[in-house]
Image: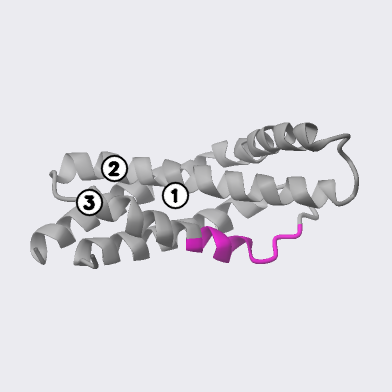
Amino acid sequence: MPTAARLFAAIGFLLIGYFGAEVVKPHMPEGTQFGAFSFVCAGIGLLTGWIVMGGLVGEGMVRAAGYGVRVSVTLVFWALLLFAIYEMLRRATKMRYDGPMEALTAVFGIGLEYGRYLLAPDVLAVLLGGGVLVGMLSEWAARRWS
């Protein structure tokens, strides 16, 4: 059911997804083609904010801050999984794998490789600090318009 808290969470995590993607771009290898990278991350942020954070509000500001970090981690998990699967499929069409199991296990290696770029301090600040802020704003919206 639509609520103000879900709307705040969705918009907030959409922004975290977009700006997090923009901040991570300089840390990626030179020559990386990004395409719709930022917009896909924004869409994942919108969904995780609406579905996950929107359902967690109402338990106080401290818990909301923790839930915001949890939703940021959820956003990162789904983005890494999606982009790792995409990269695996791209490599699979070039016949780089001997079989389907090798391709499926490569998803985890690719995800870890991409996750390494997220460990930069500026990326962590956007994801974790933004998660805390959006969590608290969502809690505020739940209290204000409930």
Q: Is residue 62 left or right of residue 81?
A: left
Which mark is on residue 126?
1
Q: Is residue 77 left or right of residue 144?
A: right
Q: Position of residue 120 (x, y in %)?
A: 56, 39
Give the SS element for disc 2: helix
Give the SS element for disc 3: helix
* Amino acid type, mark 2: Tyr
* Residue span colored magenta: 33-43
Label 3 Cα crowd, 10 Å radius (few <14 / some 14-19 / many 20+): many
* Amino acid type, mark 3: Met
Rendered view: 109 above or below 28 = above
Q: Are marks 3 and 1 in contact (CB under 8 Å)?
A: no
What residue is at 84 percent from the left and 35 percent from the top? 99
Q: Which residue has dot 3 on it? A: 136
- Please indicate, yes or no, whether residue 34 appears anywhere in the rendered image: yes
Which mark is on residue 27?
none
